[in-house]
Image: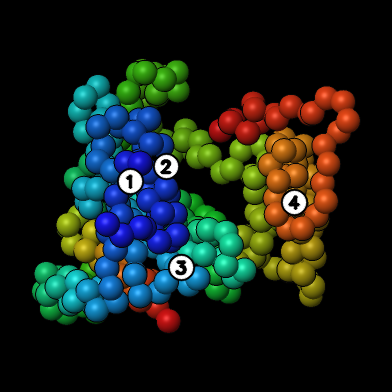
Amino acid sequence: VTTPSSIESQAESFATELTATVRALVPDCRPFEALVNLDRGDAAGRFSVRQYPETGIVLTVDGEPLLTLVVQFHCEIDSVGRYLAVHSSKIKVMAAGDAEPLLRYEFLRDAVGDMPSAHIQIHAHRDAFTYVMARAGERSDRGKRRSRRPVVPRLEHLHLPVGGPRFRPCIEDVLEMLVQEFGVDRPDGALQALRAGRESWRRKQIASVVRDAPEDAARVLRELGYDVHGPQDVLPADNIDRLQRL
Amino acid sequence: MTGVVKSLTGQQLVERREAIVLALGGDEDAARSAAETYTLDSRGQALVDELDDIDYLLEA
């Protein structure tokens, strides 16, 4: 019997967590599978993770297949050789039986040039979108309203989540997207100003996130070598609502 | 643990890669072009995704 390497153990944990997440929706979905290159060793360890069947996990409405979910993660040990980092992720949602996605949530840690590292791409020109929206299930309030509305569903009726209260895009993201995607006019230095604004906003969000989960923040600081002590009296509670909210 | 781990050597990954290209008809460039325009079926699309996985793992 051989002992699994650190990277194999991390790959297994990652695949297990993904499986548990998707099983919340599809209890009988097959386990996610991680693929590891044994030759890289732990220090330069990498793995990929994907769902099975490889053609995607079928999501049903009233027991009938409506959508297919395809998930692909590429992960590696970070540059200090300590933490697991996601190098890229792709989450694709297709109408069942279609190869072309309706939408894609993607992340590329090392996105080049003007590509947003985390983004959503919508294949909105397709009739398939109207089809799946018209067949929305009635187990949620939004789905019920959509399925009972006597009008053709429109893409604008969808609300795509983008990170919740703390990790949502900031206005600088939207403005830079308009510059990059539509060539909106900009004065010299505009992109630098937007990036500085984004940094400022994210630093404020970091402070907010620390207040949401102070013990996690303290643990990471200790791992980085800081000497961190909790308050003398009552430990502040985590803001579970904010951590869980869509 | 319910996640599955498949551990392969670099050589095994190269062999798997060759098998995937064959399954895609032997012309990787053509298969990738078809994948970009979603003219492959979902099985073919999944094979191209697997090529991406293997390339990532083999990357220097």
Q: Residue at x 86, y 33 (%)?
A: A231
Find the distance from the CA under tag 1 to the CA under tag 2: 8 Å
Q: Which mark is residue A42?
A: 3
Task: Name the residue beneath numbered marker 4.
Answer: A222
Going by the image, does A84 lie left or right of A212?
Answer: left
Q: Pointers 4 and 1 in contact (CB under 8 A)?
A: no
Q: Amino acid at mark 3?
A: Asp
Find the distance from the CA under tag 1 to the CA under tag 3: 19 Å
Q: Amino acid at mark 2?
A: Glu
User: Residue A175 appears in which quarter of the rendering?
Assistant: bottom right
Q: Picture coordinates of residue A170 (x, y %)? A: 70, 49
Chain under numbered label 4: A
Q: Picture coordinates of residue B21 (x, y %)? A: 17, 74
Give the crowd class for mark 3: few <14, some 14-19, many >=20 residues within 10 Å.
Answer: some
Chain under numbered label 1: B
Q: Pointers 2 and 4 in contact (CB under 8 A)?
A: no
Mark 1: secondary structure = loop
Chain under numbered label 3: A
User: Residue A148 appears in which quarter of the rendering?
Assistant: top left
Q: Residue at x 50, y 71 (%)?
A: A43
Q: Nearer the viewer, residue A209 or A41?
A: A41
Q: Pointers 1 and 2 in contact (CB under 8 A)?
A: yes
Q: Residue at x 70, y 30 (%)?
A: A238
Going by the image, does A200 lie left or right of A123?
Answer: right
Q: Are marks 2 and 4 on the same chain?
A: yes
Task: Name the residue beneath numbered marker 1.
Answer: B3
Q: Amino acid at mark 1?
A: Gly
Task: Name the residue beneath numbered marker 2.
Answer: A17
Q: Nearer the viewer, residue A1 or A31?
A: A1
Find the distance from the CA under tag 3 to the CA under tag 4: 23 Å
Q: Picture coordinates of residue A145 (x, y %)? A: 42, 19
Q: Are marks 1 and 3 on the same chain?
A: no
